[in-house]
Image (cartoon, rainbow, N blue to C red):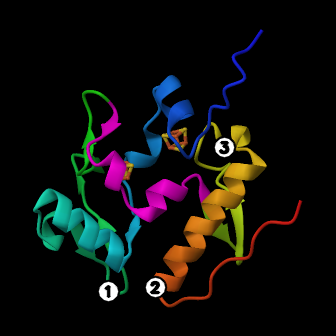
Amino acid sequence: MTSGKVVGLLDGEICLKMRCYKCCLDTRMILTPSDIERISQKTGLKREDFAWFDGKYWRLKNVYGHCIFLDPTTGRCKIYEIRPLGCQAYPVIEKNGICVADYMYCPYAHLLSKKELIKGCRILRKIFKELKEKPPEYPKF
Ligand code: SF4
Ligand code: SF4
């Protein structure tokens, strides 16, 4: 008999169980203004300490091939509670204007529930609105 507990990807349960931190390697995660403000305030770091500007977006910095906030010895995020919105939504991404699971990159994307896909999409829409871009549509089931 199972415990009935729903394990998920968006809350990191499956990632922890599978010891996966693939999406924290060579990250190109975009940061919103609220991400930058929250992370700066809580860590005391300046924006330039953890982000770089690609000419259009601020993105998370990497060190030695992984996100600056990844602890490579444990595979855990050092700022998990205040991580960027894009990290909170992943593996939900925008593709052709619709929210989809990133089956191409995340090895466990097939375990994403419909409820999580909707939740991730809600977060993605928030990101796009912050960046003043057209938010992706919710998926149709
Ligand atoms: S790649 Fe997928 S399973 Fe791995 S840490 Fe990222 S979201 Fe979790
Ligand atoms: S902020 Fe945390 S969750 Fe996001 S890429 Fe970096 S280590 Fe991974």
| Helix, strand or loop status at disc 1 | loop
Spatial CA span between label 1 and label 3: 30 Å
Residue 88: image location, x then y, percent = 48, 55
Residue 26: image location, x then y, percent = 36, 52
Give the mark count. 3
User: What residue did someone put label 2 on?
Assistant: 131
- 103 vs 13, left or right, is right
Of callouts 2 and 1, the N-terminal one: 1
Residue type (three-letter) at the residue carrying disc 3: Ala
Query: Mark 3 CB in 8 Å range of ligand 1?
Result: yes
Please say if the residues under marks 2 and 1 sit with CB atoms less than 8 Å apart.
no
User: What residue did someone put label 1 on?
Assistant: 55
The structure residue drawn at horizontal position 68% and vertical position 70%, both measured from the top left corner, is: 95
Q: Residue furthest right?
A: 141
The structure residue drawn at horizontal position 69% and vertical position 17%, both measured from the top left corner, is: 3
Residue 31: image location, x then y, percent = 36, 71
User: What residue did someone put label 3 on?
Assistant: 109
- 130 vs 115, left or right, is left
